[in-house]
Image (cartoon, grey):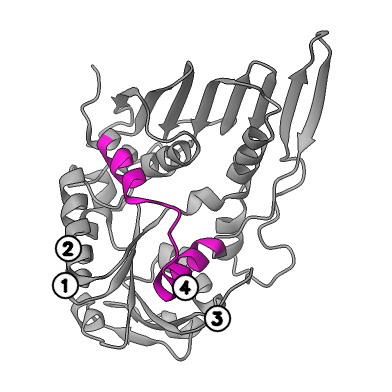
Amino acid sequence: MDTNINKTINAGLLAYGMSGKVFHAPFLQAHSGFNLKAIVERSHKNAVNDYPAIISYNSVDELLNDEEIELIVINTPNNLHYEHAKAALNKNKHILVEKPFTATTAQAKELFELADSVGKQIFFYQNRRWDSDFTSVRKVIGSGKLGKLVEVHLRYDRYRNVIGPKVFKETPVEASGLLYDLGPHLLDQVISLFGKPLSYHKILGKNRAGTLVDDYFSIQLTYPDSVYVFVTSSMLVVNSQAAFILHGVNGSFIKQRADIQEEQLLAGMKLTDPDYGIEPANKEGLLTTIDADGKKTEEHIPSEIGSYLPLFEAVYQAIANNKPYPVTRADVLTQIEIIESPAIS
């Protein structure tokens, strides 16, 4: 990575649960352009075990009042993203916000206006653009081997037949439910490939006993030239299906969800480990093409090494060198518009 370091950016994390420990802190620490200065820990003070020099604040307000911190990572519960983003911008901080960015497009537009008025930047943490499995999908599409695309499926499934302990996900508060949890991942991948759809419609379902929020969704998106994209997620899939299925006039590509980074980081693996980001064996995507004579050819497509470090590099370059960030405001507004739109009955 050709990082041009001309300043060090002090960063702060608003929480040190799983997301802070796995998705943010290791990358802020590894990138030479950032100094992970502080974190918010309201009760258990665990961050010092991993980062001995870190400051552990007791509240969000304490961290936001640290004038040396330039970038705030907002990784608090979904329903607090808007509140904390607004508070950080009002303290003249750049912000990196986990998905979902906000619950509504109105909230998003308000934050954009505020950021512009105070001269600070908003970054969207859409890390799944850098998953090893998705990079292989992008590579296959870019190769042109499938020809004109006809039908594209993206899935993100789990099996959790119980009501989880996280109130902000399982009760009908703002930005709760599976659509707000996993929908931003899938929709951002689609939008990064195809842009804004011509039209869309979605279905929501509640299937677990006693659930108060959606635990199933399916969205069909229509694109020019008769390209149809389907995104689906369920919390009741025992046998995982392929995460990516692409059909084109010249062939098909099938890929399992295989990015290993989360599992490795949870196990304590360092970004410098030679095995970091490498998919397990036998997880390659299968590309099947057919020529003009009807002859089929099968090709296993290995994925590139996964790493979320390029996301943090993009944040750094935007702040330090005013380079454009790859996830745009228009991308996020399209995503939220789809998520907040009414479902069909």
Q: In the rendering, at what x and y percent does residue 116 appear? A: 22, 64
Residue highlighted by disc 2: 114
Q: Residue at x 31, y 42 (%)?
A: 180
Q: Residue at x 43, y 29 (%)?
A: 232
Quarter-wise, where is residue 255 in the image? top right
Q: Nearer the viewer, mark 4 or mark 1?
A: 1
Mark 1 burial class by Cα count in 10 Å: few <14, some 14-19, many 20+: some
Marks 2 & 1, CB-CB < 8 Å contact: yes
Q: Earlier in the sequence, mark 2 or mark 3?
A: 3
Q: In the rendering, at what x and y percent does residue 272 appear? A: 67, 73
Q: CA distance from mark 2 to mark 1?
A: 8 Å
Q: Nearer the viewer, mark 4 or mark 3?
A: 3
Q: State the SS at label 3.
A: loop
Q: Residue at x 75, y 21 (%)?
A: 289
Q: In the rendering, at what x and y percent does residue 102 appear? A: 24, 51
Q: Which mark is residue 25?
A: 4
Q: Earlier in the sequence, mark 4 or mark 2?
A: 4
Q: Which mark is residue 54?
A: none
Q: Which residues are magenta?
A: 310-337
Residue highlighted by disc 1: 90
Screen quadrant of the C terminus: top left
Mark 4 burial class by Cα count in 10 Å: few <14, some 14-19, many 20+: many
